[in-house]
Amino acid sequence: MPRKKKTDAQPQRRGDPNVVGLKAEVISQPITETLEKNYMPYAMSVIVSRAIPEIDGFKPSHRKLLYTMYKMNLLRGVRTKSANIVGQTMRLNPHGDAAIYDTMVRLSKGYGALLTPFVDSKGNFGKVYSRDMAWAASRYTEAKLAPICNELFGDIDSDTVDFVDNYDGTMLEPTLLPTTFPNVLVSANTGIAVGMASQICGFNLEEVCQTTIELLQNPDHDILSTMPAPDFPTGGEVLYDEAEMREVYRTGRGGIKVRARWRFVPKENIIEIYEIPYSTTGEAIIDKVAELVKAGKLREVSDMRDETDLSGLKLAIDLKRGADPEKVMAKLFKLTPLLDTFSCNFNILIAGNPRVMGVQEILDEWTSWRQDCIRRRVYFDLTRKKEKLHLLRGLGKILLDIDRAIAIIRNTEKEADVVPNLMAGFEIDEVQANYVAEIRLRNINREYILKRLEETEELEKAIADLEAILKSRTRVRSIIIRELKDVMKKYPSPRRTGIVNVADVTETVEEEDLTPEYPVTLFLSREGYFKKITPQSLRMASEQKYKENDSLNMSFESSNRRELLFFTDRQQVYKAKVADFADTKASVLGVFLPTALEMDEGENVLTMLDPGDYQSELLLVFQNGKVARIPMSAYETKTNRRRLTGAYSDKSPLVAVLPLKEPGEYVLRTSEGRALIFKSDALTPKASRTTQGVAVMTPKKKHVVDFAAPLSETQIQNVSRYRTRTLPAAGALLKEEDRGEEQMSLI
């Protein structure tokens, strides 16, 4: 297409090659300045204003939502549509209706993410233990504040916390909520900021309150005695390790292991899981179990399904006949999220600064903050009572001559002069005079005034008591203790998560129990290619494929749980498990062992061996005619080492490795064609792997021993010809009928 010509109506763009005479303006700025001016304010905004909870246990989004519901009179009123709450909250929270509703869902009773939910919900709010169970839209659900919110807003109007303007300056909102209990530890909280995160597990309300009381009375109180472990809304069981728990309580960091609760139904041969760890979901567990069943690692399970209904969570696992439910669950705990770790990171904002603190430090900070709230409340009440007392004392002066006060008011021509005339007539100040002037006509009688004056003595006592509280730290702490006891009494909260001592968990799963058990046939080629083939695959196609000039070295039947030893030409042995290799077919080349086992450059595999239980012995045959009898246990290691150096003597090349399960006769053959039969009993066992062995056969010059095998696996017919009374011996030349070369092998 022809290029469209520019016209005067088209704007000229900076950087357009067709535009002449314009220069791009480049402004240089140091990267440190860019970070300081642009990135740091954003990072601090996320940390302080969004992601990290403060000492009251709430993030700003939680606080804005709850305060809006409080102002909507939803603490004592009836439920309203969630959409109404979301709309009102947008006056404080400018981040959109979806984010606000998500916040409400997390705080709701229906969702179940908190031990002490703050939103009394009605309708479908989803479930914390389900990944796919979506909550209904806000126009369908209803909500109001839960009764425990009385502990959040009971004295919020008594100047206990600071208020600031909302984002557009049209209303005020609290910077914190004056919680009467340490909600920062009771409510689980998770937040990811910029460069830091927060992960706080929930604790039982009664245990937290009791622990706080004990610490107020005795700073050396052992926290674990009253608050032994976290309490999760989804239940389950905490695997309790005192040393690890103390470390988490001390530092605010660490992991807490939680496992599911289950029961076995013998009649149906199923396992029912009815409580799962807080950090996972039912769908994640089912997906993992299905993956294990498909991979053949969980052969005892035939099916798993989600039977969750209105009564709560239930995951059903169908077992195969004869399966042990205890062992199956031990496997599931090992391989699935049914046993999970909750990672703790108690990062909390204190005076705008993020700090990672231990449990006692958090409770100390909360106690200090709560004392300040109570002092502010007491001072607020004290100020109001002093103002009222001041008014009543002015009224008391009027009582001395009510008729005179009435006369002053009646004889005053201008309304503006009433207050000054009363001030002059009774020597009271302007506030007191205004109070007297505003008394209704019906109340200008002696009885009314005397009743008001009776309050003066009570006010004086109350003021003295409030002033004493402000001066006494002990009195302030006693108020905190009383309020905590009231919370425990009004909101009983039985523990949901059980505690199981790690030492009592005796049912463990060995690594081999996790490996599926099934028969396989193992093949090793002369070039070092390895195959593991199942019987079914062999029945379908048994013809083996090899590279050009390669052929079978050895093969034998084994099991997927067995261990293998690979002897190489560098005096090294490599250990591997059969399960480490994938099942394959006869039509593929297989795994190249030097690469798979990370062997040294130029190192080659000589033979492979199934050591069994390491209780038998080995015969190592060398080219110089010596044979070493070594116990198989010499190659057994306690650790998971994959390479053993110095596996055999380096004085002569290795010819064969023969398992010696029981005494018997063996054949050696030289490159000259001589053969020798000897008994294994003639050799003395040696403990050292690097022993040179005992001379059994003496090859002629320029010839070496190149073959060794059990007598039963050869085609020798004239057995007596090759036997000898003494060792070493040169052997006898093989006769034609004794060769059977096509039949002789190492197997």
Image: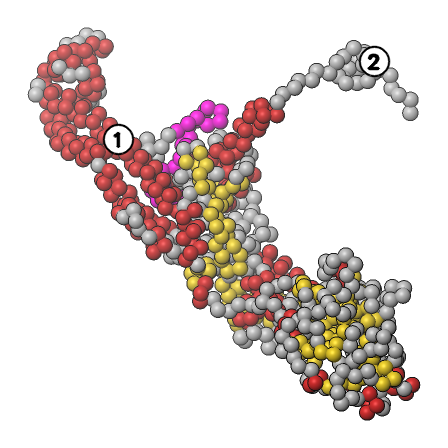
475 vs 560: above or below: above
In-front residue for pair 264/556: 556
Name which of mark 1 and mark 2 comes first in the sequence: 2
Residue 168 belongs to the span the image colors magenta: yes
Q: Nearer the viewer, mark 1 or mark 2?
A: 1
* Residue at image coords 82%, 68%: 525
Q: Is residue 571 visible?
A: yes
Residue farthest to the left?
400
* Residue at image coords 73%, 86%: 679
723 vs 404: above or below: below
3 vs 216: above or below: above
* Residue 442 image-quadrant placement: top left
Picture coordinates of residue 142, whole percent (x, y): 48, 44
Under mark 2, the amino acid is Thr
* Residue at image coords 63%, 58%: 287
Q: What residue is disc 1 on?
A: 379
Task: Report the span colored magenta.
Answer: 163-184
In-front residue for pair 73/742: 742
In-front residue for pair 226/406: 226
Q: What residue is disc 2 on?
A: 7
Picture coordinates of residue 510, whole percent (x, y): 57, 68
Residue 373 belongs to the span the image colors magenta: no
**Position of the N terminus by quadrant:** top right
